[in-house]
Amino acid sequence: MKKKIISTILCASMAVSMFAGCGGNTESTASEGTAEETAKDETAAAEESADAEGAAETAEGGKVLNIYCWNEEFKSRLTDHYPGYTEIDATSGTIGDVTVKWNITPSDDNAYQNNLDATLLKQADAAADDKIDLFLVEADYALKYVDTDYTMAVSDLGIDLAEFDNQYQYTKDIVTDSNGVLKGVSWQGCPGALFYNREAAKEILGTDDPAEVQKAVADWPTFNATAEKVKAAGYSMVSSVNDTYRVYSNNVSSKWVEDGKINIDANIMNWVNDSKALVDAGQAGTHELWSDDWSKGFYPEGKVFCYFGPAWLVNFSMAADSEGSIANLGGWGATEGPQGFYWGGTWICAAAGTDNADVVKDIMLQLTANEEIMKEIVVQDDDFVNNKPAMEAMAEDASYQSKVLGGQNPLSMYCAGAGKIDLSNQSAYDQGCNEEFQNAMKNYYEGNASLDEALELFYTAVQEKYPELTH
């Protein structure tokens, strides 16, 4: 839900206005008027002095850079690629004479956002070394922060927006507020692909060639037909029906909320119908993403044919560093799948009130606009970065090979997908609606509720989160 949080400056202005209104009297004497004017002059002088002092502090720079995030991904990017970063320990480092403090709170049960929200509410009164300077957001809830005064306009950091001309447009759209102001940047693009188990593909389809595998998953009817062959060979087509959800939800023709009313798009219902068929046929489970049961397919004995995701999934989340995993063995392949989609991404936002604006500015520029650093991230981390020239050049580079993909270069596929991402149906309600819909439908898939009952569970849960909505 969009919730406009009023800035400290605006609150102060309101307080002054309210005070003046309470004290106003059309029969005030001239002396009272003179006293009031004198008080106003003194207040203005004090405010001007405070502003000057604050500007001096900002120019000098703070001593502590506080970064809020939910896992180690951004920390590893900064630690490994930002020039001049020195690590002290797992929770701190230095950039020049500034101490960097990492405040990492996992996203489980919304803990990261709850912690961030509580801290931002105290931002105005916090001591300089305790203020949040930089924090990270994901696509599903970016608007919650972008449409507030707690995020700074990127241009207010002194950045020429032309620096980001080579970034994929959708990555800028996600963090552009309702007034058209850019409020964050990302180093990565997240176009999705279908990652398939190469050994399973050879066994079931007779080949692990990406072009040939694509023929077996080219659209949803073909995908579902292939699922029958996969099941016959002793594999699940996907670990969970939740694996396919993002592919369907990214290809809707309407928003979750239309004119204040909860709206279920036809393609979301296609997911429901196709998923129910997969579960009933024993071709997919209903596991929660990130659960132990869902993760079993990261290993050969898990017997899962494919997962859907962007580069960060197979590189960062599928046990690539664990001996014996499919990723560690270079045993995944990548192909387009039934529909193009994107999933996730991480955006860097500057917190209003930061006393390290220059450092935040340089982090944004180095990690998201420095083409050489971005190429370095691709080579070292197998990530897909947010720089069109860099990615297009590396897509044509025969020397680049993804270890987790058995030497495949998937970048041309990612590039094509990134350029087609359309966010015209994005809304501030996406996170809540997506989560509650999947939760409700699990009851239907597992036979604990009829479809109508599951839909009613969904409506009830969403309206508890967003009381202003109807259905």
Image (cartoon, grey):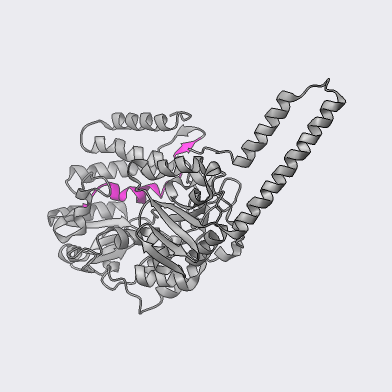
In the displayed structure, does residue 180 sit left or right of residue 110? right
The part of the image, by quadrant, that contains residue 188 is bottom left
Furthest residue to the bottom?
Answer: 399
In the displayed structure, does residue 405 sit left or right of residue 389? left
Q: Residue at x 83, y 20 (%)?
A: 27
Residue situated in front as seen by the camera: 375 or 284: 375
Image position, residue 163 (x, y; %): 57, 65
Q: Residue at x 50, y 32 (%)?
A: 260
Q: Is residue 138 above or below residue 33?
A: below
Magenta stretch? 237-258
Image position, residue 276 (x, y; %): 24, 41
Q: Is residue 78 above or below residue 271?
A: below
Q: How many marks?
A: 0
Q: The C terminus lies in which quarter of the figure?
A: top left
Kindly tell me whether residue 47 is visible in this rendering.
yes
Image position, residue 160 (x, y; %): 61, 63
Kindly tell me whether residue 384 is visible in this rendering.
no
Query: Is-magenta flag for residue 247?
Result: yes
Query: Is-magenta flag for residue 165?
Result: no
In the displayed structure, does residue 31 sit left or right of residue 270? right
Q: Is residue 370 above or below residue 48?
A: below
Furthest residue to the right?
Answer: 30
The part of the image, by quadrant, that contains residue 148 is top right
Q: Residue at x 41, y 74 (%)?
A: 394
